[in-house]
């Protein structure tokens, strides 16, 4: 069969890879100059690294297998990292049980309830039931009012803004479940991994691998419309008036984009795609002459800080990758219409750097080498109440047209591993009965068992 895939992020690349392994013709279309999507790499000063922060966990088996297929998994570096907490104007380490018990902002009972909440969440299996409960109500009940107000609420607001009030308990469950699995796999340690060279190396290798498999890659190509006829003919229209026919078309773009590209969807489908609430991100990459602290991630509960967290990538990645300097990410999660998207780079830089000076007394703006800002309006779909029941279906009402995007990750957080898993699950729906995907060491036939996707 001849497949057209719209969207060349990790999801689209994974689907293209698996479909081609099964003997299909695949055309992968991406509006940007190169493949990668949210996993793109860019240059900040003299440093080329990931545009947004990414790590691989020991439990990320789908992603690690794919890295193995393109020859990169064996060269990964694994590092034990530490976690910091910035609260009430002080920086604390929260990297082990002893430090947790010493954590001053919470009393002993508060800590017991917080630890109990995390442990309980790690054992929950029926995540669908949690979709019916607001995350704030669930956390207050389990952790108590003080722990919620002091720890959970600032973290929820940092990640979700005021949209936390619309979000279900499944959101925090998924977050806890992934990190708990990582610590269990890492023998109670926070072991994070990365590929030397970062996603720049990964994407170049993956793109080359797809081309070698026969995937036709079209970058700088932004489709304007997808249509289908009742007899099953599916067409992708391009910006220059081109019109190309495929047996099937898979859209991996955010749901609002799918709605625009497919005007012939039913009213219910348009309502479902446009009804999803997305969070965007404004993320600064800062190259510094020296480190800020020893923590990979520093969670922030003080609401005066203008960013969500401090991600110090150079606590994980060898600083030689950054010319001997330190690379820090300063993300701020916001709604797609937040004024921050219109604020100038100079204004954001001034506010962010001033906050770093206040948080880290040893830091001076003279330590700043380069500063660059990424803005994306549709990053992650919010896990609202009864979320999975409101999702648009993968198979659309248009014959041969499928909508597969990260909004359909219902029982996990948005991360590269679960994005790969989503793509591989989707292929079960896309392939014809009897077709097979040739893996590195085996041949697995797609048997068309019911998909776990909506």
Image (spheres, rainbow, N blue to C red):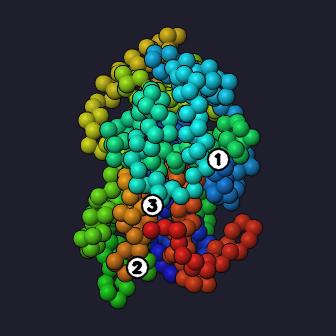
Relative image position of residue 366 (x, y in whole percent): 47, 13
Residue 319 location, quadrant: top right
Residue at image location 58% in from the left, 21% down from the top: 103
Q: Badge 2: how crowded within 10 Å, few (<14), some, or many (20+)?
A: many
Do callouts 2 and 1 mark residues in contact (Cβ within 8 Å)?
A: no
The answer for how far apart the CA atoms under marks 1 and 3 are is 21 Å
Q: Which mark is residue 181?
A: 1
Q: Badge 3: how crowded within 10 Å, few (<14), some, or many (20+)?
A: many
- Under tag 1, what secondary structure? helix
Kindly report which numbered mark, 2 or 3, lies closer to the viewer in this rendering: 3
- Mark 2 and mark 3 lie on one chain; the one further toward the N terminus is 2
Q: Which mark is residue 408?
A: 3
The answer for how far apart the CA atoms under marks 2 and 1 are is 37 Å
Do callouts 2 and 3 mark residues in contact (Cβ within 8 Å)?
A: no
Q: Is residue 393 above or below residue 327?
A: below
Residue at image location 37% in from the left, 54% down from the top: 385
Residue at image location 32% in from the left, 38% down from the top: 162
Looking at the image, how many numbered discs can be counted on the residues?
3
The one nearer the camera, 337 or 42, is 337
Q: Badge 1: how crowded within 10 Å, few (<14), some, or many (20+)?
A: some
Judge whether residue 270 can be spotted in this image.
yes
- Mark 1 and mark 3 lie on one chain; the one further toward the N terminus is 1
Q: Which quadrant is home to the C terminus?
A: bottom left
- Mark 2 and mark 1 lie on one chain; the one further toward the N terminus is 1
Kindly report which numbered mark, 2 or 1, lies closer to the viewer in this rendering: 1
The answer for how far apart the CA atoms under marks 2 and 3 are is 19 Å
Do callouts 1 and 3 mark residues in contact (Cβ within 8 Å)?
A: no
Q: Is residue 58 above or below residue 228?
A: above
Residue at image location 38% in from the left, 58% down from the top: 386
- Under tag 3, what secondary structure? helix
* Residue at image mark 2: 400
């Amino acid at each position: 069969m001849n497949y057209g895939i719209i969207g060349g992020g990790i999801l689209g690349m994974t689907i293209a890879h698996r479909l081609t392994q099964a003997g299909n013709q695949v055309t992968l279309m991406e509006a940007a100059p190169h493949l990668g999507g949210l996993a793109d790499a860019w240059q900040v000063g003299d440093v080329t690294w990931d545009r947004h922060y990414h790590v691989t966990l020991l439990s990320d088996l789908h992603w690690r297998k794919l890295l193995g297929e393109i020859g990169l998994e064996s060269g990964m570096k694994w590092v034990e990292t530490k976690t910091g907490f910035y609260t009430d104007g002080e920086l604390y380490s929260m990297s082990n049980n002893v430090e947790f018990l010493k954590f001053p902002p919470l009393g002993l009972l508060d800590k017991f309830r917080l630890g109990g909440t995390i442990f309980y969440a790690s054992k929950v299996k029926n995540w669908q039931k949690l979709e019916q409960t607001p995350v704030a109500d669930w956390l207050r009940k389990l952790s108590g009012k003080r722990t919620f107000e002091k720890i959970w609420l600032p973290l929820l607001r940092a990640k979700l803004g005021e949209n936390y009030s619309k979000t279900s308990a499944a959101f925090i469950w998924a977050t806890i479940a992934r990190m708990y699995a990582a610590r269990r796999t890492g023998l109670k340690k926070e072991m994070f991994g990365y590929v030397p060279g970062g996603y720049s190396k990964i994407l170049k290798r993956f793109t080359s691998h797809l081309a070698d498999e026969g995937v036709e890659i079209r970058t700088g190509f932004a489709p304007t419309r997808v249509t289908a006829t009742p007899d099953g003919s599916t067409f992708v229209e391009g910006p220059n008036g081109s019109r190309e026919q495929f047996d099937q078309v898979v859209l991996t773009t955010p749901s609002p984009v799918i709605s625009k590209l497919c005007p012939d969807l039913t009213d219910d489908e348009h309502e479902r795609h446009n009804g999803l609430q997305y969070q965007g991100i404004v993320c600064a990459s800062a190259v510094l002459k020296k480190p800020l602290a020893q923590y990979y991630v520093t969670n922030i509960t003080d609401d005066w800080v203008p960013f969500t967290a401090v991600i110090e990538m150079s606590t994980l990645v060898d600083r030689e990758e950054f010319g001997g300097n330190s690379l820090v990410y300063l993300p701020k999660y916001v709604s797609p219409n937040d004024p921050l998207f219109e604020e100038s780079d100079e204004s954001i830089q001034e506010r962010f750097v001033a906050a770093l000076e206040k948080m880290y007394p040893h830091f001076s703006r003279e330590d700043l080498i380069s500063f660059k800002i990424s803005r994306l309006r549709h990053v992650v779909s919010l896990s609202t109440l009864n979320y999975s029941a409101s999702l648009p279906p993968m198979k659309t009402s248009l014959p041969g047209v499928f909508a597969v995007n990260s909004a359909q990750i219902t029982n996990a957080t948005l991360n590269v591993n679960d994005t790969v898993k989503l793509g591989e699950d989707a292929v079960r729906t896309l392939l014809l009965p009897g077709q097979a995907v040739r893996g590195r060491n085996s041949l697995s036939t797609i048997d068309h068992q019911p998909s776990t996707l909506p």
